[in-house]
């Protein structure tokens, strides 16, 4: 059963935010506070001492329902924000595989470098120009262990 808080309080004709309780006549600021007042919800409003218990129970139920809906809505929103999170996950997965590639290369390079101590190596300079006539030089270390 739904309860309309507007049936249990009267908005003040002078001040829009002031609502007077139908049971004890207390003025609270706004209908949400009247709900808290009637539902005996702890907050910055005093609980109503003259509210019928069925009205109080209905107010509590409604306040709980509102809270539940709000939480459900928030949960729903956080599900939506999962999408960019998933994207981040796949991006970091790519980085991890790049990292693994890099580690493989480094392992290869250090293996080849280690072989230089045994076999020695020759430095090869490869000089060339690209189509924009930029001068490029590749330094290569050639050894029986491999070329870097
Ligand atoms: Zn009251």
Image: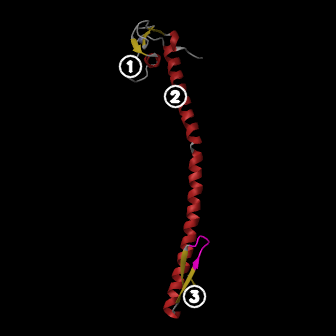
Q: Is residue 42 left or right of residue 141?
A: left
Q: Is residue 139 above or below residue 81?
A: below
Q: Is residue 39 left or right of residue 108?
A: left
Mark 3 in CB contact with mark 2 (< 8 angstroms): no
Instruction: Say what secondary structure mark 3 lies in.
Output: loop
Residue designated by label 3: 145
Q: Which residues are magenta?
A: 128-133
- Which residue is at a point 56% across and 74% down the rendered structure image? 104
Q: CA distance from mark 1 to mark 2?
A: 18 Å
69 vs 58, nearest the viewer: 69
As drawn, the residue found furthest toward the top would be 13
- Which residue is at a point 56% across and 63% down the rendered structure image? 96
- From the top left corner, tell me how far across and down residue 54 is, in percent: 52, 14
Quadrant for residue 50, please give it: top left
Q: Could you tell me what secondary structure mostly forms the magenta stretch? A: loop
Residue designated by label 2: 67
Mark 1 in CB contact with mark 2 (< 8 angstroms): no
Q: Number of callouts in the render?
A: 3
Residue designated by label 1: 45
- From the top left corner, tell me how far across and down residue 136 is, in percent: 54, 76
For the rendered model, the colour scheme is secondary structure
Density class for disc 2 (Cα within 10 Å; few <14, some 14-19, many ≥20) is few
- Which residue is at a point 56% across and 87% down the rendered structure image? 142
As drawn, the residue found furthest toward the right would be 131
Image quadrant of ligand 1 equals top left
Point out the tag, 3 or 2, that comes first from the N-terminus: 2
* Magenta run includes residue 129: yes
Q: Quadrant of the C terminus?
A: bottom right
Point out the tag, 1 or 3, that comes first from the N-terminus: 1
Q: Is residue 27 above or below residue 107?
A: above
53 vs 23, nearest the viewer: 23
140 vs 73, nearest the viewer: 140
């Amino acid at each position: 059963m739904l309860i309309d808080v507007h049936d249990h309080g009267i908005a003040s004709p002078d001040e829009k935010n002031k609502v007077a309780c139908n049971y004890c006549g207390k003025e609270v600021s706004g209908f949400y506070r009247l709900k808290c007042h009637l539902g005996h919800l702890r907050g910055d409003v005093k609980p109503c001492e003259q509210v019928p218990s069925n009205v109080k129970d209905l107010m509590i139920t409604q306040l709980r329902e509102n809270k539940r809906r709000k939480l459900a809505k928030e949960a729903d929103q956080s599900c939506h924000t999962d999408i960019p999170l998933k994207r981040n996950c796949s991006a970091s997965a790519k980085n991890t595989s790049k990292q693994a590639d890099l580690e493989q290369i480094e392992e290869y390079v250090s293996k080849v470098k280690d072989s230089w101590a045994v076999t020695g190596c020759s430095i090869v300079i490869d000089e060339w120009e690209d189509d924009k006539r930029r001068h490029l030089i590749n330094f290569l270390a050639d050894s029986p262990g491999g070329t870097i």
